[in-house]
Each structure stands twice: as C-alpha cells, then as structure tokens.
Amino acid sequence: MSHPLFERHRPLLDRALQAIAERGYWSPFPESPKAYDEHLPAYGKTAFEALLNQPFPLTLPGTVGKVGAETSPYDVALGITYPKVELDQLFAAIAEAQGAWRKAGPEAWIGVSLEILTRINKRSFELAYAVMHTSGQAFMMAFQAGCPHAQDRALEAIAYAYDEMRRIPSSARWEKPQGRNEPLRMEKHFRIVPRGIGLVIGCNTFPTWNAYPGMFASLATGNAVVVKPHPNATLPLAITVQIAREVLAEAGFDPNIVMLVAHAAGDDTAQRLALRPEVKLIDFTGSTANGDWLEKNARQAQVYTEKAGVNQIVVDSAEDFKSVARNVAFSLSLYTGQMCTAPQNVYVPKGGIDTSEGHLSLDQVAQGLAEAVQKLVGDPARAVEILGAVVNDGVAQRIEAARGLGPVVLDSQAITHTQFPNARVRTPLIVKLDAKDDAKYLKEWFGPIAFVIATDSTAQSLDIARRAVRDHGALTLSLYSKSPKVVEDAIEVAEDAGVALSINLTGGVFVNQSAAFSDYHGTGANPAANSALTDAAFVAGRFRVVQHRMHV
Amino acid sequence: MSHPLFERHRPLLDRALQAIAERGYWSPFPESPKAYDEHLPAYGKTAFEALLNQPFPLTLPGTVGKVGAETSPYDVALGITYPKVELDQLFAAIAEAQGAWRKAGPEAWIGVSLEILTRINKRSFELAYAVMHTSGQAFMMAFQAGCPHAQDRALEAIAYAYDEMRRIPSSARWEKPQGRNEPLRMEKHFRIVPRGIGLVIGCNTFPTWNAYPGMFASLATGNAVVVKPHPNATLPLAITVQIAREVLAEAGFDPNIVMLVAHAAGDDTAQRLALRPEVKLIDFTGSTANGDWLEKNARQAQVYTEKAGVNQIVVDSAEDFKSVARNVAFSLSLYTGQMCTAPQNVYVPKGGIDTSEGHLSLDQVAQGLAEAVQKLVGDPARAVEILGAVVNDGVAQRIEAARGLGPVVLDSQAITHTQFPNARVRTPLIVKLDAKDDAKYLKEWFGPIAFVIATDSTAQSLDIARRAVRDHGALTLSLYSKSPKVVEDAIEVAEDAGVALSINLTGGVFVNQSAAFSDYHGTGANPAANSALTDAAFVAGRFRVVQHRMHV
C-alpha cells in the first residue's frame, strides 16, 4: 500500500535514486538564495528574530523545565530556551508512538521524511540565520552548507534507505520440487522493521549538515529519532524537530517519533541517552574522545561516528602555482579552517618544486601560500564573509599555542566585524615545520592553523600522509603534481590508507567541499570516521527484515 | 576490466541475483546425492579416508609445528594434524598478498570466489564425511546441510556482495552549472577497497554452513580471510581453505589471501586473532559468552555474531494434531536438537487446545508429542539417520541435568549405532514445566531437550515468547493455530520482538530449516544474532569506497 506523501514526492525520490546510481552533479535544493521566492529572505530573517529571547515553541512530553544558553559567535545573545525533558517520560512517550510508525511501512517512512525535508527547505532562510548565529559561519555559507547542501545530504540518505528497502520483496511464493510428489509450497512475507530509536548527536560547527544524514537515514527506515543538539547549536535542530513533528502529526502519526533533547553544556545528557537500551542507532559528530567513548560503551547500538582527523596537502609540482596558492588559501580560510575537511598539513619537498614558471624554493612556496591568504583576507569587509567567526574560545587559544610550534610564515590576525564588532574573527596562521616534527603536526589542530612541512621528497610526503591517515584519520587528501607517476602513487596511498583524494584543484572546487550525490564524505576506512555519508553501509543496518511463512 | 573467472560464472551469478531479488525457491547446488556424477560418492569416501591418520596436505607460511586432535562423535579417531602457525609470520605473509588482491577489483574477487565454490561443490562427498565425523550429523544431513545448502548460502553471500558493489559507478563526470560562466567540470573515480582481513570463527556443529557466508562475503569484497575452525571441526574448513588456495594460485594470486589457523582446544588463539589490528571483520558462531567477548573487545573490527537463543513453539489450536506432532517431533529429533534453529519451549494452554478431532487436554498434547517422537526414533537403525550423534559430552550431561527440572514426559534414551557402536546417540527428552518456571526454561538448553510449558492462555504464551526473544534471543518462533486473530497476534509479536515466524508447519517443512535465497537465517534484531544470513547489511560494511577527483 502506498502513502499519499510517498506519491507526492515520488518524482523527487526517483531523481535522487538516479543521482546516487550515477554520482554525477545533481542538487535538488538550490544553493543560490536568488532561486527562492523573493519574499523568503526577509521573511526568514523576521522569523529568526521572532524566535530570540523567548521560549522556543515546541511542546514535548516529559518537560520538567527550561534549558538554553546559546551565544552567537557574533556576540549576539540568543536568549532562547527549550523544553528540558525527563528522559524516562520522554522514552515512555516514544514507546507509545513506535508501534503505529513501525507498521506504517517503508513508503510512509519515506513519504513523511521527504515531506519534512521539503518543508525544511522552505524555511531555509530562517535556518540559515540559526546556523550562522550558532556555528559562526558567514551568512552565505550558513545558507548554502546549512540549508540546501544539508538538505541534499538528507535526501541522499533517504534515497539510499529506500534503495535498500525496495529491493526486499514483500512476499514470495516458495515451491520446492519433490521428485514425483507434489512440490512443497509456502508463502513467505518479509516485513521491514526498524531497529528502535536512533540517537543523533549534533555538533557546534555544522548543526544541520552533520546531523541530517543520520537523522533522516534513521527516520526513513522506520526508527524513532531523538535529536541531541550541541548546547550552543540547538536552534537549527529545534526548528528541524519542530517541522518534523508538525508533518508527523498532520500525516496522522504521533509526533513523538521525533524528539529534541536540549541540555546544558557539560552535563551528562549525551552519555545517559547513549546508554539507554532503547537506543539502537547513534549518529555522532564530534571529538575523537567522545566518539571513542560511544563506540566503546554504547554496546547496545550501532554507532556511526565522525571524529577528528589530519587533512593533508602534498605539493609535488604545479602548472600554475598562483592558482594552486589561491585555491589552498581559500580552503585554509573558509569558515576559519573550522571544517572537518579543511587541510592542515602542507608537505613540500625541501628542495622546492617545479612549476611552469620555473623552480620555486620551499620558502617561496610557503611565502606564496601566505601571500594568497593575505590577499584573500586583506579586506576585512570581504574577509568576514569568507572567515565567518571563531566558534569558541578554544579555537582562539589553539591559535596562540600553535604560534610557538615553529617559524611563523603568516600570523593570524583578529579582524573587526563591522556589523558585529564583538565577534571573534581570526585569519589563518601558517607555521613552518620539518618532517621530523611529527609530534607537532600529526594531530588535529582544529581551527585556522596550517603547517608547511619540509620533507626530503614527495615520496616522503606521501609516506607521511599514508601513516597520518592510518594512525590519526583524515577526511581529505589533496595532491598537486604535474607527474602522472606521482598522481598514480598518490592514488595508491589514498586507496591503501582509505582517504578521498583531490588532484590539482586550482579552480572553483576546493578540497574541503564535498558534494552530495557525488562525493562520498568520509570513507569509513580510517579513524576519522567509521562510515561514509552516504552509502549503502550507512543505511543497511538501520532496519531488519522479519519474515513469516506458512504453507499455501 | 572483466576477469575470466567472472565471465565463466556470470550465468550462475546472474541467476543468484535474480533469486535474492525474488526470494522464492532456488538451489543451484543439488541436495540429492543422486544428482551428482555416479562415481563421486565412492570417490569422496575414498578421499576422506585417505586424509585420516596423517598430516593434512596444506602448506602455510609461519608453520612452526603440528596441531590437531579431532575425535569423531561416532568414535572414529581422525588422527589428522594441521600446520600450527606463528601469527606474526602468518599476518606478514597476508600483508604481502593483500596489495595485488585489493587492486584486482570486484570482478576478480567475485570470479575467484565463485570458482572456489564450484570446486567445493565437486568435493561435496568428501566434505560430507568430514562434516559427519566432526559434527556428528548423520551422513545425509552432513551432505545436504554441510555441502549443497552451505554452498547455496555462500553463493547467496557472494550475490549480495556483488549486488552492493555493482551499484557503485566506477567513475562519474561532475558538471556544476555556474550561471553564465563555464560549468565546473570534474571527473571522479570510485574504487572499491576491502576493509582488510576477515576472521571467520567456525563452530563444531555446522563447520561449513555457519562459516561460509562470512568467509565468502569477506573474500568476495576483496578482503583476505583467516579461517579459525573449531578444534574438533577443523577438517571441513581445512579442505575448504585448501581449495581456495589452489584457485587463488591458479588465478595468479598469492594463495596467502586465505589462511587456516588450526589450534588446540582451550588455548587463546581465537582471542589473539580477534584482537589483531589487521583484522577488520569477524564472523563468529558459538556461545553467547564468546560472542559477547568479541563484540566488547574486538573494537577494531566489525563483528557479526550468531549466539545462543531460546526457540519456541506456541500451540494454540490445530486442524490435525497428529501432523502437528509429527512435524514437531522431527524438529526436536533432527541432529539431536543440536541445531541453532531447533525448538526448545513448547507453550500449551493449561486448559488444552481445540483440534478438528476435538478438545485435547494439556497432558494429551504433551503425550501426543512424546508418542510422535517415540515413533520417529523407535527403530534404532532409522533413528540414527535422523539423530546423528551427540557432538560432545556437555550435551549428554545437559540431558542428565534437564531430567530433574520437572515431570518427565518422554525420557531420553541412549541408542546403539550398529555401524559405530561407541557413538554417543541420544533421543529427545521432554519435560513438563509451568509458566512460572521461567528461571528454568528461559535459557538455552542446547541439545535434545524440550519443555512443554503450561500457560494460562495463548495470550500468555505469546507474551512469554515476546519477552524470551527480546531478552534471550531466538532464531525461530513457531505457531500452531486455527484462529486468524491469533495468527495476526503472533505476527505482531514476531515483528515487535524481531524473530522469524513459521505458521502451522505440518508437512515437509520444519521450523529448524531455513532455505538459502529465500529464508533469512536470523534477523539481527534480537540477542541471538546481530546480523542476518544473508542480507545487504551483512555485506555492505565489508568494503569501502575511496574516490579521487580532478578537473577535466
């Protein structure tokens, strides 16, 4: 039996299924604000501002008080509170809601998920302000990465979920020949059932982009979902949960299938949620320490984690070094290097590199990168639209600590934001190190911190890169080389260590960008993440098949 | 690029892909010995006997001695030794072999796996004797379950693996429109890479059937495989590994992609293997204690476990109780109840049940089951062909212990096997219990031990069944009822608790049988197994995708 919401969104789903099969370019949710109804930008801003300084309009079972103390990295106090919930009551309400949701079946789960998603898209401007003022991303990035790109990733997860579920027949006739006797005849029915409850643990820097794949993968496979946002990035997920609950209720389901657990920083809410026996799936983005804790302790659940890593660029040679430097400078600067895909280590042979404009020494390479960054962030008004704001004081302190690691090629500077004068805005720091300083550079320095590392050769650069991916994890690896042999070697390293490789990016594509429906975000093959967003493995374990059989 | 072995077996693979999409009846490997070349049975017996009382012909790197002390449950000393290997040397040899295997790609992995499988099929009679004299299964069962049925399950795993891998495009062209400017154009390449090494931990009762799915799922996705058989069921897997290594070598690969680690009972080989950092996948069949240990401690690996459970039959009413009793009696007797799918608890309302021949009291039901078992195993010559032999002394001792739990409805008897007079052969024990005796019956009594449990009503029977599945795990649930309402209730319990349900089996299909390509063996949704044999979730995590991208 089909579901009206499934039928409504069938064309979108079909196109998404084609996209995941081809993995070329496709984006259903426009990334240009101009593609949206002209009243939406102003409406979204008004809607965001209307949320400030009051309780967020969300009614949840088990509410015992209020919680919330978000402060924008742009130094705007949000002043929003959320329901503080008592977990036993919350989970009791979920238990009541689950039966009907389980029985509704895949087409209802998919249809409801797609309806939620398209409504989220309509509130993209409101959500963009929410992402901006929790993560510190500049508005345009908050809009693009936090809204259409995040929505694309959600749709990708829904499409993979459906692609796995649709291949399971709902029933089968089984006829086993018995020689001259009548065959044995049975009918078998295969019902897809969810695992239980999916817990989604959000992060501060990409509250929607990193939470949506797991959230929608779990929901689209019939699970209930408990969303636990970062205490300083609750608003974007509160809006998301609000929309989800509206759609569920309108579709005749108990809205308690999707819950929000807002909480105060530093409490044990995440741990208590993760150890609930009802929680069978956990999607986590955050620190290696917290991710490892979940993997080790939340034994009752399948845990999908994205943790820290060391992203790297191997510079071997270049056609046009200026375009290399421009490209790398943007990757170092975008959102102040606070992307999980942002490069940190730039390996350069100490003998320098060949370029089409002649040989460049190591110092010339380092200087060229520094100048490109300086040029990109030299104009404060333009710089803040790229850098955004520093998400928390830890990043600012980390810049201080990194300054002392070696010779500073480019110092980090504080920039005054004209619109938000108290915002923490910092430009990238570039420090020169030697290959032997691996104790310094073989760990994540989260923030706008890059190292130019002198190696004996490109071969050594690749060796270090391989070891770093294997031992410390990475989401991205980037190579610049004119040599087909070096390109082959780098591909070998990437496939052996298990990291996505970008080769000779000099134009409008950057190593820290991964496109939904085309790029796999993470491989699941190194310590930075135990899964990829999104592939079959990310969804196939979120449901089970329960059969019953009888003689015909 | 295709591989010749892939092309050779393409028709078989295509048919298997159709079978997993439809899940009706299909079996490529005939279960009737008569379907095989007429010289094969005698040849297989000779080949088996030629293996006895000498070192098994297998050369492995890191060999430091000999190990092996298998004793047949039929009291035939096998006298076979296997290479005893030093693990560091073994893993060093695997590391050397892995690179070329990884690069060979999915069609080579699939082609080699299918070639291994078809050669295994040709040695089915030799393998049947090996399974018989390690597990204690009667010859016909050892042949069917240990050879064609196990091979079917292996092919099923290979087909699922290919089905997942084939949906990943090897490359894509990505063109992102840029308004009036030229689009951004990239080419992307997606390479499938294995996780590393798959460890397969075999069991004593079904050395091939339970090992093959994991072994072939890992191999078909490019992993190396280390097979660790049960110390008393090494031979079937040694033959399997021997065939795999032959095929690998003939296909130009390093045979060290498939290894055997035979070991002595009671040593720590399993634990040492499971904690090797190179091991990324573990397939385990065995006790709950050992399975839980792996899940808790082998944190570097994805662990697939099949553990203990409590299988149940709910008797509510029946059209023809005699055929019910016959069917259940066979399920209790087959291989002396030593199947992971064999029923243990039979719930019957204390007020008795309605049948088409009239009302039967609880005691009449219990007596009817006892008589049906007695009839089935009354003739020793026929009985041993159903019962086989008791796999180890623990089972025999467990029968003793179970006798004291309550009133004995049918006592277990020792039977003398005419061909193997010292074989341990036992008939089923049936003990009557009350619903309140849950401390006795809510745990696995592995072996020919069944309980007829008096409940207040079928509703209570179903409640107990639900709780047992959730808390203790189960692979099978069986219902006998004439009432459509009770059937619906049982389906609800099955789907809620996550266990496969068989309804009104009275003919030639038994609850303990699960057919490859049609029945899911296990759901992965209750404590008896964290995965199903075989579905997408069982294979999707055994490989990863590593991409590289560059501008066009």
Image (spheres, coloured by chain):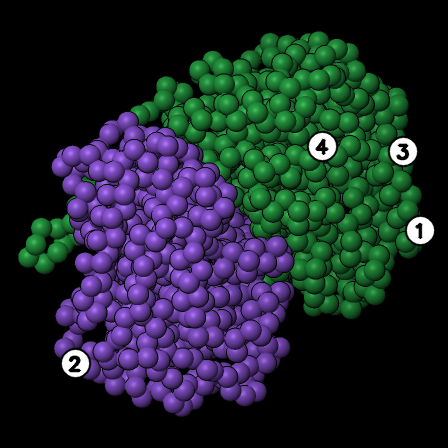
Chain colours: A green, B purple
Furthest residue toward bottom: B54
Res A386 quadrant in image: top right
Callout 1: helix, strand or loop? loop
Q: Are marks 1 and 4 in contact (CB under 8 Å)?
A: no
- Is label 1 on the same chain as label 4? yes
In three-dimensional space, the C-alpha distance between marks 1 and 2, rounded to whole angstroms, equals 80 Å
**Identity, as a three-letter code, of the amino acid under mark 1:** Gly
Q: Which residue is mark 1?
A: A404
- Is label 2 on the same chain as label 3? no
Q: Position of residue A237 (x, y in %)?
A: 64, 25
Left or right of residue B102, residue B342 in this image: left
- Is label 1 on the same chain as label 3? yes
In three-dimensional space, the C-alpha distance between marks 4 and 3, rounded to whole angstroms, equals 35 Å
Q: Are marks 4 and 3 in contact (CB under 8 Å)?
A: no
In this rendered view, identify the residue nearer to me: A360 or B495: B495
**Identity, as a three-letter code, of the amino acid under mark 3:** Ala
Q: Position of residue B7 (x, y in %)?
A: 29, 64
Q: Which residue is mark 2?
A: B39
> In this picture, is B271 found above or below B497?
below
